């Protein structure tokens, strides 16, 4: 199936540092990433967050970057989050958790050898404390399966001080239904997505339909539990099923939320927000957009066409 090859190829390219270095520096690329990325500066991220809240949506902001092998870069990322949270708080956007942040632990040092986990944990702690002072929350993104145990371990540590720290779980992993059971308790914020990395058959479902079925099983566990489910998907079928499961579980609209990525299905985002559901947009910003954008391309050929067309027409 050519579409599967293309997806695998793009996911492989998403880890290609040579191509990344060329594209991230090319101004032509910068103009076409705009649809999916808020901009490069803190100020631009704050502006986009303000526009979203004005339209009745909430936001979670991600400072782009991942897989850092440089301790200074991990510190730089931590500082960027501190600046961002301070800027958001100054304009009142963190109030009531309207705008929160999402962290990739690999950008905060998780992969820095033997001390990596400790470094990432310390950086995440600093960010959580600033978020707490600003009155908002933090959610840990989930990266490839080699990091899942480590990330859930760091989640447990952080939750001892800040029980509102949330995590992402990916329905393509066989383990995730059990992880949902473990995390479906009171106060636990779980963002359920399908998963976006290239994973082997030994750990992950390969067929889209199996990933979707697993998503529904995970949703059932989360909706029936005591936690706060965050339905992170653009899939109309799954969104409909989530609504039915929430009603069956007797959940009110304040006890869960829908989430989508910036630039994807904006009309549907507004529709869900307007019908009284809690809705949050994931907003990436910063200049390290390459890996993020390549994963979006791999998910949807029309995104790739959009990207190529913008390159061609400039
Ligand atoms: P999928 O890509 O299978 O699409 C299903 C259907 O949705 C399509 O058939 C179409 O109907 C509709 N659709 C999708 N894209 C569309 C478009 N551009 N226009 C119109 N319709 C469209 N992943 C991860 O591994 N770790 C993480 O931490 C996160 N974090 C995260 C946060 C949030 C808030 C979101 C929304 C997603 C993530 N992801 C993630 C990414 C996630 O795993 C997944 O790769 C993407 O969301 C794409 O999967 P969908 O659920 O949208 O379904």
Image: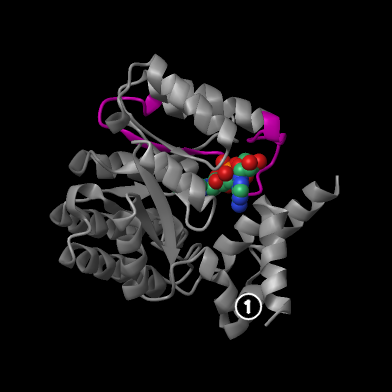
* Rendered-image quadrant of the N terminus: top right
Callout 1: CB less than 8 Å from ligand 1: no
Q: Residue at x 33, y 16 (%)?
A: 250
Q: Residue at x 16, y 51 (%)?
A: 135
Q: Could you say where residue 212 lies in the image, as x and y percent from the top left?
A: 62, 30
Q: Residue furthest left?
A: 133
Position of residue 91 in the picture relative to residue 124 (left or right): left
Q: Could you say where residue 264 lies in the image, as x and y percent from the top left?
A: 54, 53
Q: Is residue 39 visible?
A: yes
Residue 183 lies within the magenta run:
yes
Quadrant housing residue 175:
top right
Magenta segment's dominant SS is: loop
Residue nearest the observer in this picture, 302 or 203: 302
Position of residue 58 in the picture relative to residue 176 (left or right): left
In the depicted structure, whether residue 61 falls above or below residue 180: below
- In what element is the residue under mark 1? helix
In this picture, which residue range is highlighted in magenta?
181-209
Position of residue 18 in the picture relative to residue 161 (left or right): right
Q: Which residue is mark 1?
A: 23
Q: Could you say where residue 47 lies in the image, as x and y percent from the top left?
A: 33, 69
Crowd rating for badge 1 (residues with CA inside 10 Å; few <14, some 14–19, many 20+): some
Q: Is residue 12 visible?
A: no
Q: Residue furthest right?
A: 1
């Amino acid at each position: 199936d050519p579409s599967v090859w293309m997806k695998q190829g793009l996911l492989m390219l998403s880890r290609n540092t040579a191509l990344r270095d060329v594209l991230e520096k090319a101004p032509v690329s910068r103009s076409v990433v705009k649809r999916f990325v808020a901009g490069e500066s803190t100020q631009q991220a704050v502006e986009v967050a303000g526009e979203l809240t004005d339209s009745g949506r909430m936001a979670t902001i991600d400072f782009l970057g991942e897989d850092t092998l440089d301790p200074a870069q991990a510190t730089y990322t931590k500082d960027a989050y501190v600046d961002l949270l301070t800027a958001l708080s100054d304009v009142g956007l963190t109030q009531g958790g309207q705008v929160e942040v999402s962290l990739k632990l690999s950008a905060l040092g998780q992969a820095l050898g033997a001390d990596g986990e400790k470094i990432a944990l310390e950086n995440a702690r600093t960010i959580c404390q600033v978020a707490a002072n600003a009155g908002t929350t933090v959610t840990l993104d989930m990266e490839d399966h080699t990091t899942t145990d480590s990330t859930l371990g760091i989640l447990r540590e952080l939750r001892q001080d800040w029980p509102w720290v949330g995590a992402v779980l990916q329905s393509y992993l066989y383990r995730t239904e059990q992880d949902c059971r473990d995390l479906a308790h009171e106060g636990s914020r779980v963002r359920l997505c399908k998963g976006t990395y290239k994973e082997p058959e030994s750990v992950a479902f390969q067929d889209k339909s199996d990933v979707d079925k697993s998503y529904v099983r995970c949703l059932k566990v989360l909706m029936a539990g005591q936690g706060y489910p965050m339905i992170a998907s653009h899939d109309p079928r799954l969104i409909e099923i989530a609504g039915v499961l929430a009603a069956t579980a007797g959940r009110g609209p304040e006890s869960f939320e829908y989430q989508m990525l910036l630039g994807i299905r904006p009309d549907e985002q507004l529709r869900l927000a307007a019908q009284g559901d809690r809705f949050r947009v994931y907003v990436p910003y910063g200049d390290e957009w390459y890996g993020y954008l390549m994963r979006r391309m791999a998910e949807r050929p029309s995104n790739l066409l959009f990207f190529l067309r913008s390159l061609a027409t400039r």
